[in-house]
Amino acid sequence: MTAKKLKIINLSIFLAFFYGYGDCRKIFQGYQNYTTYKTGTLNVILTVPHGGSMKPSSIKDRTIACANSEGQCTWKTDCHQPTSNCTPLVESDYNVQLLADTISEKLKDITGKYPYIIQTELKRNKLDPNRDKPEATLFDPEAIKAWNDFQNYIKEAKNEIKKGLLLDIHGQSHIEKWIELSYFAKISEINSDQLQSDKSSIYTMSKRFPETKFNELIYGNESYGGLLESKGYKVVPSPSYKKPGSGNYFPAYYITMEHGSMKGGNIDAIQVETPFAYRRNLTYISRYAEDVASVTVEFLKKYYGSTSSGAERVLISIPSMILFISSFIMQLID
Ligand SMILES: [Zn+2]
């Protein structure tokens, strides 16, 4: 066989591997299949904490819990008199798993690569992975295992990606019908005119752009909200709605604040609360997901300079290097 033929075969194998790898996703299910983790090769993580439907009787319901003598919730349920102030939220987000899967397909259409997805299959009255462990589980041993799986899968995805963006996918039905983005744990932080980057979940990203005012990264034309607004959506924060003011608005919770870059690291996070209008059925979801995917890719290119996870770079570069070296050697001895 001539070196020329070998080179063609090698190139074909390389191309088949390159294109084939984009479709190659591993799926893990965690303890009792309560958590689903789909791996990807794009440097984006989609988390879906409120879209599950499983209600195993072996996990106790999240209901009214206890407070300590200072009135702070302990989230234990074995006290004499639980307090209504310590009643966990249990409302699910309609169609958000379908929304995340559709955004994932649209991202694949644009980039050839899937994002990572982590979702709980448990209903929110059994587990809320978007709260810290006590409030999330009310100390139920099985719920704790599922909570640990959820957070550990996020850590695994972050380790593979190295540098990228986590979008925490939610739904709300507020009368403002706006898309609510959050980078902060408190509404006062977004309503104040002195936004502090080190209290936000995009702290690391902001440090790469010291010449850009931090406010611009939150509600400027090229912020995530600004890019969504340019597609025709009503968004807060964005150039038209810089802050929610007294409007209905959900600030970021555990996933965004824990797994974003407020505490360091190279993964930033944004909580994305989608109005019901874009989640009502697959037709609406599909149109909206296409815009979210397109905005996400634009955002990645502008602020991360890449749309690849570290895993893909390693897996593609090693075989390709071997193949090209072997081609070169064959050419020399031909
Ligand atoms: Zn939610």
Image: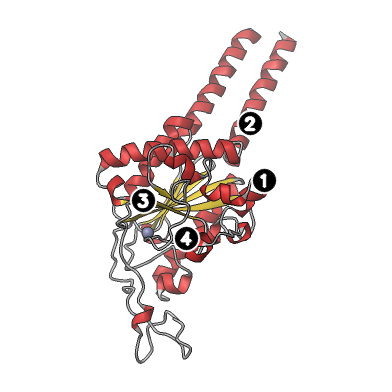
Secondary structure of the residue carrying tag 4 is: loop
Indicate the amino acid at tag 3: Trp
Distance between the Cα atoms at labels 1 and 4? 22 Å
- Answer few, some or many: residues within 10 Å of disc 4's Cα (few below 14, many 20 plus, some between 14 and 19): many
**Image marks 1 and 4: residues in contact by CB distance under 8 Å:** no
Residue at the image position 28 percent from the left and 40 percent from the top? 284
- Label placed on residue 178: 3
**Colour treatment of the image:** secondary structure
Q: Which mark is residue 208?
A: 1
Query: Relative to 228, is 124 on the left or the right?
Result: left
Crowding at label 3, few (<14), some or many (≥20) Cα neighbours within 10 Å? many
Of circles 2 and 4, the one toward us is 4
For mark 4, what is the residue?
252
Residue drawn where x is 48% and y is 31% of the image:
111
Structural distance between the alpha carbons of marks 2 and 3: 43 Å
Q: Is there any visible trace of residue 186 in the rendered image?
A: no
- Kindly identify which residue carries mark 2: 317
Q: Earlier in the sequence, mark 1 or mark 4?
A: 1
Q: Nearer the viewer, mark 1 or mark 3?
A: 3
Amino acid carrying label 1: it is Arg
- Mark 2: which secondary structure? helix
Q: Which mark sits nearer the N-terminus, 4 or 3?
A: 3
The residues bearing labels 4 and 3 have C-alpha atoms spaced at a distance of 16 Å
Please state the total of marks drawn on the protein image: 4
Q: Nearer the viewer, mark 2 or mark 3?
A: 3
